[in-house]
Image (tube, helix red, strand yellow):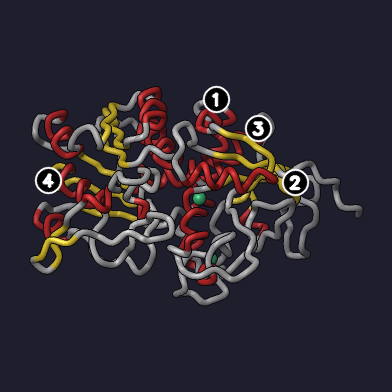
Amino acid sequence: MRLTASAICGTDLHTIRGTLGPMEKGTILGHEGVGIVEEVGKEVRNFRPDDRVVMGSTIACGYCSYCRAGYYAQCDHANPNGPQAGTAFYGGPKDSGPFHGMQAERVRVPFANVNLVKVPEGVSDDQAILISDIFPTGYFGAEIADVCAGRTVAVFGCGPVGQFTIASAKLMGAGRVIAIDTIASRLEMARSQGAEVIDFNAEDPVKAIQEMTGGIGVDRCIDAVGVDANQPHSGPGKPSLAQRAQFKVEGKMVAPKTSPVGGNWEPGDAPSQVLQWMVEAVAKAGTLSIIGVYPETAKIFPIGAAMNRNLKINMGNCNHRRYIPKLLDLVRNGTVDPSKILTQVGPLTSALDAYKNFDKREDGWIKVELDPQPVPARAA
Ligand SMILES: [Zn+2]
Ligand SMILES: [Zn+2]
């Protein structure tokens, strides 16, 4: 593939910090890409050079029982470390393959007959790049939350995936969407999509939700934050969300540790603040959906409160390939314009600065597209 668009994702920040496990030195980062087919392997019967395509972030074989059931993220064959090794994806830690990623001029796509989807006429690169990962992930989050007509849905986290979760909940007919974050530009974008917004630093989100719902709570809660359930952007002297949070573990109140490198929440010792809030903000017998990324080492979930309130919990890595064709159609027919989420588009060579600004959650930095400089097609 010759890439014409790539992007930086929140997951890349975990990758570079090692939150998701160690990297193999030299692995190229990035798991979102749009481009042009340069060359196909002999088993690729459905694409040929010059086809314009988008790649899903996760890698699937297309023929195992999981892929056939639509659980592409649980494919038995794509991860060379074996069927129990976890989701295979581009530009990730050792355990995820590793596969070279898409913050590059070219990329090799395994099982290309399954992992490429043709971009229809009329869908731009700026639109298609968002269908590589974050739009499908948001859609998946709303789908596994069982959002349907009339439901009141709370979306925790208004980053890029959270924005698409809001859009997807609305597509599925949600009656009300409540969006929780603290960054002004992210809350503003959520509001412009019709969400009712809560700044969790200005008020207690659980209390606010109770008040907004007549004391019942919301029907569905979606975690679009994951392991980043703190504020690496909170600045010196200002405690992060994780630092402020206190949790009961084995009867003792403990504050979760924060990592010295990036201010990230260190998994394993306490539930994330977001999960705690969700369990408290959802109505009895409601449904929780978790699409924010957690490392396998994260162990503790507020199980007692969830069990005693008869909650349903669905979660996982997005099965990208399952949603990409449908979402491309929604974009082509004008139902959704995902490129509204893009706040920065720069050359691939500006990646280092883009990573820094995105990591700081600079106000106004929501989604960054990186464009490789046009590279000449390889001579046949
Ligand atoms: Zn991603
Ligand atoms: Zn498979």
Q: Mark 3 vs mark 4: which is more N-terminal?
A: 3
Q: Amino acid at mark 3?
A: Ser
Whole-number angstrom distance, CA of label 1 to CA of label 4:
37 Å
Q: Position of residue 355 (x, y in %)?
A: 55, 47
| Residue at left offset 36%, top offset 46% | 236
**Residue 330 visible to an observer of this rendering:** no
Q: Do tag 2 and tag 1 residues touch (Cβ < 8 Å)?
A: no
Whole-number angstrom distance, CA of label 3 to CA of label 4:
43 Å
Q: Mark 3 vs mark 1: which is more N-terminal?
A: 3
Q: Secondary structure at mark 1?
A: loop
Q: Amino acid at mark 4?
A: Lys
Q: Do tag 4 and tag 2 residues touch (Cβ < 8 Å)?
A: no
- Residue 284's disc number: 4
Q: Mark 4 vs mark 2: which is more N-terminal?
A: 2
Q: Position of residue 263 (x, y in %)?
A: 38, 54
Q: Quadrant of residue 60?
A: bottom right
**Residue 126 visible to an observer of this rendering:** yes
Q: Nearer the viewer, residue 158 or 111?
A: 158
